Image (cartoon, helix red, strand yellow):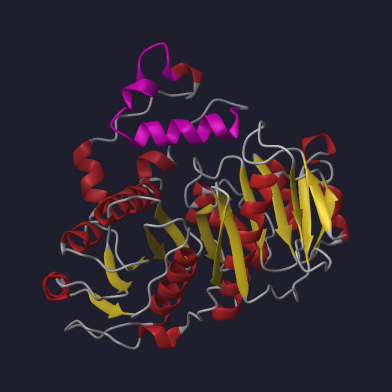
Amino acid sequence: MNELELKYGCNPNQKPSRIFMKDGGELPIRILSGKPGYINFMDAFNSWQLVRELKQATGLPSAASFKHVSPAGAAVGLPLSDVDRQIYFVDKDAELSPIACAYIRARGADRLCSYGDWAALSDVCDAATARYLKAEVSDGVIAPGYTEEALAILREKRKGTYNVVEIDPDYVPAEQECKDVFGITFQQGRNNFRIDEALLSNIVTESKNLPPQAKIDLIIALITLKYTQSNSVCYVKDGQAIGVGAGQQSRIHCTRLAGQKADTWYLRQHPKVLGLQFVDKIRRADRDNAIDVYISDEYEDVLAEGVWQNTFKVKPEVLTAEEKKAWIATQSGVTVGSDAFFPFGDNVERARKSGVQYIAEPGGSIRDDHVIMTANKYGITMCFTGMRLFHH
């Protein structure tokens, strides 16, 4: 199959639409279920590159949850803790494979943004992963293969219309890539820059402490940024992205947005949140939205009299601003990556409020000295990678 006709492009009025191989070769994919669209394939091919590189860099099964050509979350397949199982709504007795853990953690980074996501898996999709995917609102999945049981499970999803794409793991794209904007063709070499531990060798701060897990987390942050619409900043902890700030015009807004998402991820582990008692048979999306609102400054929207009864069995106590601030202050061991240099120390100031202890950024700002001074002020370890990772 050299080309595949699509229903339409980004919007229904953009017809005709197709994907095809300009060199006349075969598309490196097979459609096993459903009928993916233009945006689905944009998410699929970007997310596949991300998880493939994560697996190559860490040696661990990797997964991503994509929405509108940027990751809502990305993670490697480390085991889930008891708290992880609670906040990601996984049965405590469920048997999980490493690739299932990777996707559950990727999806769990920002469950609101992952609603209706495209999933990407570095490894063959097994039944454990398929069962979790089947229960979530998702548009499709791309993987290098599927077990018979997993494929049978996924083909039952959405009355048989769920998009399941198999990609050839040995496919190597052309060195040059092109795209058209306003009828004008742009061409550039593919970004084949390799991200590994060697990129973290230039530590510019007084603190030189960079433990093995922090190195893995920084690599995850940088590879995630490589496939996130710029400007972008990514917070990572224990093998998973916990906050991605994508497509912002200001660097500090990236850092704030990603930091807010990281804070929300951590607040979901607060005892008051873990203790929420939801009404029976509440939909997952309604539950996730209620948690997000409960944590936010708009908590009255779910706690007002006559409203809370629709969601909770028992009216929850308010999670006060003081309690939230105190809880976030206990967060530690977080890493941050940035796709371009921090122009001011305010980015470091914001990052450390979310427990950041390790930073990787390209360097090269005329104010690098001020950024380094700010990191030194808080004992943060910072690496200058010397490599920008813009993605558009």
- Which quadrant of the structure image shows residue 142? bottom right
Q: Position of residue 60 (x, y in %)?
A: 60, 75
Left or right of 123, for residue 225: left
Q: Residue at x 41, y 55 (%)?
A: 244
- Which quadrant of the structure image shows residue 216? bottom left
Left or right of 169, for residue 351: left
Up-down relation of residue 382 to residue 147 (above or below): below
Tell me, yes or no, if residue 11 can be seen here: yes
Q: Position of residue 121 (x, y in %)?
A: 67, 62
Left or right of 143, for residue 327: left
Q: Residue at x 33, y 80 (%)?
A: 386
Up-down relation of residue 342 to residue 299 (above or below): below
Q: Nearer the viewer, residue 191 or 48?
A: 191
Q: Which residues are magenta?
A: 282-308
Q: Residue at x 24, y 86 (%)?
A: 208
Tell me, yes or no, if residue 238 can be seen here: no
- Which quadrant of the structure image shows residue 382? bottom left
In the picture, which quadrant includes the N terminus? bottom right
Q: Residue at x 47, y 62 (%)?
A: 391
Residue 355 included in the magenta stretch of the image: no
Q: Residue furthest top?
A: 306
Q: Position of residue 147 (x, y in %)?
A: 84, 62
Q: Position of residue 228 (x, y in %)?
A: 47, 58
